Image: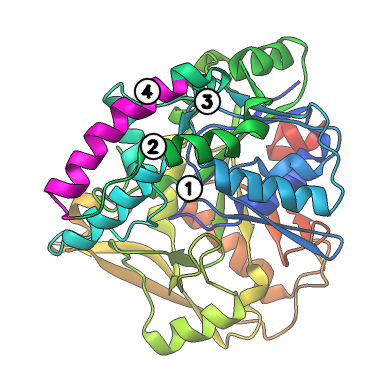
Amino acid sequence: MPNLTIVGAQWGDEGKGKAVDYLARSAGLVARFQGGPNAGHTVCVERSTFTFHQIPSAILNPKVTCVVGCGCVIDPYVFEHELAALRRKKVPLGQRLVVDSRAQMILPYHKQLDCLRDEQSAKQRIGTTGRGIGPAYADKVNRTGIRAGDLLSEETFNDKLKRNLTAANFLLMDRYNAEPIPFKATAREYWQATRRIAKMVGDGSLVIEDALRRGARVLFEGAQGMHLDIDLGTYPYVTSSSTWAGGVAPGTGISPVWLEEIAGIAKAYTTRVGLGPFPTEMGEADAARFRELGHEYGATTGRPRRCGWFDAPVVRASVRHNRLKALIITKLDVLDSCDEIKVCHSYRLDGREVLEFDPFHAAEIVPQYETMPGWREPTSGCRTFAGLPVRARRYVARLEELCGCPIALVSVGSERNQTIHFKSNKLRWLRQ
């Protein structure tokens, strides 16, 4: 049976939550391979809306086992909030949720240091979410992190927390002139907050490997967009983990040889949260209109998203890096009221044409646009490609041509059934 990896092909917020929920209807297991509470995946099912920051988006499918992989970082307070939302809606969990014992934990000092560092970096602000992601991954690399498996022994946890708090409090007081974090109260509160998670801790890599060997359909879920990748993204305006398909193996503990199909998610336009280059960013008047039409506010922070026209060179780079088998286009319906729609087909740099986004030249490239007529008809009720307005079909076909990658699905709304199969035979996952 095929397995499928889902990655964002832009700067995040592409609609991965809905895509994973939709594709997971036939899955046996879904695994998150990177990121933490800085992600926000929104899933709408039967008039209920869920926002998942850490739990895989497929948890609403009652037959799917979900794994939070070893490449993730976990805030137990956010995790418990998501569990509480599932309990309120009577979503059955049973033994379906596994937290890999090697996943890193986010501690209170991570969040405090995250905010203080960004606030005091006047010349090089990143626009962090303040969720402690960077400091938690830094502890991982520095080999001082506290992992989910450490929550199984209070003595082990306390020893590691005491050591880490000594170092964190030195920074807080000496560098930032902030109040130290008390050990006893923090240890007691955090230990209690993690009791539910501790019951879910296991070897996620073995669970995934077993599913693959049994021939189960396994879906791997990325948290942020390709161009926020720590290595390949718009550094330093990136996240702290590997967001592309190359992050799946180290983020889940399985061999990369297992990986088969990879699909990229892209909006029918482009958005970005926080600072960093954005070649096709609109003027504020157009951006404000798109922001309201598309509800473009961060699911994690609530910050208004920056909006821009579709950038084919950005998606082209994602196609190459990930060797995407297909694209899934979301939020086509947001363009329904446009008279004209711009599409960036290439850039100009030093008098020559550039076909692929390169973050090293982001400040110098000049986007080159073509303008297509809008369709001025609602698409949210369409359920087939043939049922879309003619100009909408031409727009989708043009995106496919410019990106050099077939389009498998088109989303025209937030509900599961507002999904159109465009060329489903390009993905084995959709054929079987």
Image location of residue 109, percent across then percent down: 34, 44
Residue located beneath label 4 in the image: 160
Q: Which residue is drawn at 51% across and 25% down?
A: 70
Image location of residue 291, percent across then percent down: 52, 78
Give the mark toward the camera: 1 or 4: 4
Residue located beneath label 2 in the image: 241
Give the mark toward the camera: 2 or 4: 4
Asked if the residue at tag 4 contacts the one at tag 2, i.e. Cβ–Cβ closer than 8 Å, the answer is no
Asked where in the image residue 206 lies, by quadrant, the reply is top right
Instruction: Please say whether residue 171 is one of the residues in the magenta stretch.
Output: yes
Give the mark toward the camera: 3 or 4: 4
Q: Distance between the residues labelled 1 and 3?
A: 22 Å
Q: Distance between the residues labelled 1 and 4?
A: 30 Å
Q: Main secondary structure of the magenta part?
A: helix
As shown in the figure, which amino acid type bears the numbered disc 1? Gln
Q: Confirm whether residue 66 shows in the render.
A: yes
Image location of residue 223, percent across then percent down: 52, 44
Mark sitting on residue 148: 3
Residue located beneath label 1 in the image: 224
Q: How far apart are marks 3 and 2 (CA)?
A: 18 Å
